[in-house]
Image: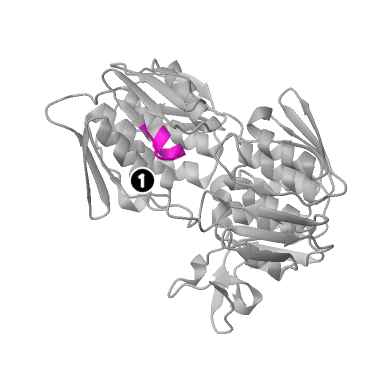
């Protein structure tokens, strides 16, 4: 529940100070995809040979995954946005809870470790508090491949059944197209004996990127990006060089920010068809979109309300629901935002209402009436994508704002405020510690844990 308190204080060492009613102009470089890089790091565990990943974003989530791999005995060498990975000296197969907690993608290592070593112990995953995101599909699929699974004291313990040294290929039908389960099972099946088919597989670009890298390593994976993926297991995987795809969520965030400020910008490099669901809605809402090679340009003037409903790829991405909600708060007319992926991803709406938005929320459906202006405020972001939405709201607002909770933003956006500065936004990261009373914020109250206030 969102509430105010007059008694407690909120201390943070960093915030973004944003001068409102800003405009964007120019060209911005899009970083490598966080969600792709994380799973590619996990996939590197499948080989003893060197992997070179290019275009790896420098993010706290990437750093966390790197620390997990180092704990397993992997040697990592950073060179700018390139990462050399050497997994030949892995000495343990259990991931420590203190490293795994808070990074859901770390759980994907279970498929690689189990398939390569015959056993793995991985704590149950953490991450943003945006919904349950159960691992049932992962477990069901790994069992179908011939593993025994025991969940004990928050640890998932997996090992290949009996005296077999390899998992066994099989047919797996997912109840829902889970991205994480699809990735976990692809990695596990890559070194399994025989053919595996994954029906109702997720089709996200990050999954296609994983399959492309694994095939470079010697895997035999067919039809990635389709609803049924086929994997013929091999005995060994080798090294390779692979470039991480551009981050479609970062790209979409900048396009939405430009639309919200009636601005014109160009983003690159991108893979345009990864963004079609977003660019189609931006066109529908009044923006002009021009695609040229690996660039997308947007020109935006008058906004009109449109409806969106989040869906698995190629549908509208749930990770851009919060930024697009911000866009609709100032669009002419009415709009409806329906979140179908995560049950707890609409709480940021209370903050937008505090800034002056007119929104009625019915469970996971937001009914929005556009307003002419929003007002700047001091706000606490506590989830990656909602933090980006708050920054967009602060840019379009009248007056100045300060956005706190940057540890969440830094998980998924590389040099976000620097890129906004390049585009002309007046934004500064402040490091001076200062205590504010909570009545300056709208935050979600949690007993004994006020600093971890939930926005979504």
**Residue 434 in which image quadrant:** bottom right
Q: Residues within 10 Å of mark 1 (few under 14, many from 20)?
A: some
Q: Residue furthest bottom?
A: 7
Q: Residue at x 26, y 19 (%)?
A: 193
The residue at the far right in this view is: 301
* In this view, 309 is above or below 434: above
The correct choice, above or below, for 46 with respect to 149 in the image is above
Quadrant location of residue 414? top right
Left or right of 265? Residue 114 is: left
Q: Give the magenta range.
A: 173-182
Q: Nearer the viewer, residue 153 or 327?
A: 327
The residue indicated by pointer 1 is 135
Q: Position of residue 417 (x, y in %)?
A: 69, 50
Seen at 57% across and 42% down, the residue is: 311
Q: Secondary structure at mark 1?
A: loop
The image quarter in which residue 379 lies? bottom right
Q: How many marks?
A: 1
**Magenta-span inclusion, residue 118:** no
x, y (%) of residue 71? Answer: 32, 41
Q: In x, y percent, where is residue 57?
A: 56, 37
């Amino acid at each position: 529940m969102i509430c105010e308190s007059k008694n407690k204080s909120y201390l943070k060492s960093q915030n973004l100070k944003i001068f409102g009613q800003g405009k964007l102009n120019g060209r911005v470089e899009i970083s490598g995809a966080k969600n792709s890089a994380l799973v590619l790091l996990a996939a590197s565990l499948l080989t003893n040979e060197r992997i070179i990943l290019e275009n790896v974003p420098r993010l706290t989530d990437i750093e966390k995954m790197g620390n997990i791999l180092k704990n397993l005995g992997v040697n990592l060498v950073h060179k700018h946005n390139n990462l050399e990975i050497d997994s030949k000296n892995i000495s343990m197969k259990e991931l420590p809870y203190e490293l795994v907690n808070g990074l859901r993608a770390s759980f994907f290592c279970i498929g690689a470790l189990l398939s390569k070593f015959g056993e793995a112990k991985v704590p149950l995953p953490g991450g943003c508090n945006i919904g349950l995101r159960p691992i049932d599909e992962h477990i069901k699929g790994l069992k179908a491949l011939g593993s025994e699974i025991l969940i004990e004291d928050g640890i998932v313990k997996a090992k290949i059944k009996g005296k077999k040294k390899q998992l066994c290929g099989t047919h797996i039908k997912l109840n829902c197209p889970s991205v994480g389960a699809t990735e976990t099972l692809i990695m596990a099946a890559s070194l399994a004996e025989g053919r595996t088919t994954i029906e109702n597989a997720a089709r996200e670009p990050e999954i296609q990127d994983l399959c492309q890298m694994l095939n470079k390593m010697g895997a035999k994976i067919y039809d990635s990006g389709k609803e049924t993926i086929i994997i013929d297991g091999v005995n060994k995987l080798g090294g390779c060089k692979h470039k991480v795809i551009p981050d479609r969520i970062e790209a979409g965030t900048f396009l939405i920010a430009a639309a919200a400020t009636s601005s014109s910008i160009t983003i690159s490099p991108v893979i345009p068809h990864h963004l079609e669901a977003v660019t189609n809605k931006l066109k529908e809402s009044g923006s002009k979109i021009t695609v040229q090679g690996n660039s997308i340009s947007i020109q935006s003037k008058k906004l009109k309300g449109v409806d969106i409903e989040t869906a698995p790829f190629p549908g509208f991405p749930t990770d851009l629901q919060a930024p697009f909600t911000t866009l609709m708060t100032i669009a002419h007319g009415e709009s409806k935002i329906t979140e179908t992926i995560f049950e707890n991803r609409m709480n940021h709406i209370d903050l937008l209402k505090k800034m002056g938005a007119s929104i009625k929320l019915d469970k996971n459906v937001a009914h929005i009436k556009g307003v002419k202006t929003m007002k700047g405020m001091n706000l606490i972001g506590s989830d990656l994508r909602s933090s980006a939405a708050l920054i967009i709201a602060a840019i379009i607002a009248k007056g100045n704002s300060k956005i706190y909770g940057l540890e969440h933003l830094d998980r998924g956006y590389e040099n976000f405020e620097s890129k906004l500065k390049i585009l002309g936004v007046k934004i500064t990261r402040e490091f001076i510690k200062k205590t504010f009373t909570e009545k300056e914020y709208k935050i979600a109250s949690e007993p004994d844990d006020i600093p971890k206030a939930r926005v979504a």
